[in-house]
Image (cartoon, helix red, strand yellow):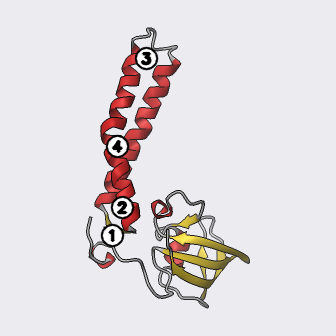
């Protein structure tokens, strides 16, 4: 993790301090007690006998795979992120709550990593998505378009951008 500006590493993702702390706690749990709980469930299910027809064993193994994938994801995200001050101004940058008209539909979404949104039900667009790459750095009033994955050009008008207060 770096506390420098994103120019230090173009692949770094901005996180709020709250999101960073929450993810660090989740990683600590998954890597420690969470991992041990799953191992204990696997061992318990294994003792029940025939593994081919043991639903508890297969469910625990699947849960283990998901937990290990989440651990890898969190390690990578936390190692390749920077925690900085919340954005200011009205430019569309990671950490901003953006209101825009996309293909004629008014939408409000968080711009940045989905982990910043936490438990909110906000729609999130990554700065690495096609729309994210197009709107990064724009300002209210800007009109542009981006190419969707299906090749269609989608018109976008930025209405407002304000710091996400989480």
Dot 3: element: helix
Q: Position of residue 122 (x, y in %)?
A: 59, 64
Which quadrant is the N terminus positioned in? bottom left
Q: Residues within 10 Å of mark 1 (few under 14, many from 20)?
A: many
Instruction: Tell me: 31 left or right of 61.
Output: left
Alpha carbon distance from label 1 to label 4: 21 Å
Q: Position of residue 25 (x, y in %)?
A: 35, 51
- What's the mark number on residue 29? 4
Label 2 Cα crowd, 10 Å radius (few <14 / some 14-19 / many 20+): many
- In primary-sequence order, the first of circles 4 and 3 is 4
Decide if residue 150 is on the left or right side of residue 92. Answer: right
The x, y position of residue 56, in whole percent, is 49, 21
Q: CA distance from mark 2 to mark 3?
A: 35 Å
Q: Secondary structure at mark 4?
A: helix
Name the front one of labels 2 and 3.
2
Let me know if residue 62 appears in the view: yes
Nearer to the camera, 25 or 138: 25
| Residues under numbered marks 3 and 1 in contact, where contact means CB atoms less than 8 Å apart | no
Residue beneath disc 2: 20
* Residue in front for this viewpoint, 68 or 116: 116
**Which residue, as the protein is rendered here, is positioned at the far right?**
104
The residue singled out by tag 3 in the image is 45
Mark positioned earlier in the residue sequence (2 or 1)? 2
**What is the spatial separation of the Cα atoms under label 3 and label 1, in whole angstroms?**
42 Å
* Residue in the image at 45% along x and 14% along y: 51
Q: In the depicted view, which residue is nearer to us: 25 or 77?
A: 25
Q: Which mark is residue 83?
A: 1
Q: Position of residue 100 (x, y in %)?
A: 64, 79
């Amino acid at each position: 993790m770096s506390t420098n500006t994103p120019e230090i590493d173009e692949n770094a993702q901005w996180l709020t301090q709250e999101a960073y702390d929450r993810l660090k706690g989740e990683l600590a749990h998954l890597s420690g007690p969470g991992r041990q709980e799953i191992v204990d469930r696997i061992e318990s299910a294994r003792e029940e006998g025939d593994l081919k027809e043991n639903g508890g064993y297969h469910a625990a193994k699947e849960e283990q795979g998901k937990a290990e994938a989440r651990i890898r994801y969190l390690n990578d995200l936390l190692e390749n992120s920077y925690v900085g001050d919340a954005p200011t101004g009205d430019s569309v940058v990671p950490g901003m709550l953006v209101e825009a008209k996309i293909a004629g539909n008014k939408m409000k979404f968080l711009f940045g990593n989905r982990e910043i949104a936490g438990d909110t039900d906000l729609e999130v667009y990554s700065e690495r998505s096609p729309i994210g790459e197009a709107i990064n750095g724009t300002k209210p009033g800007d009109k542009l378009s981006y190419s969707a994955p299906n090749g269609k050009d989608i018109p976008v008008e930025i209405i407002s951008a304000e710091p996400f207060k989480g």
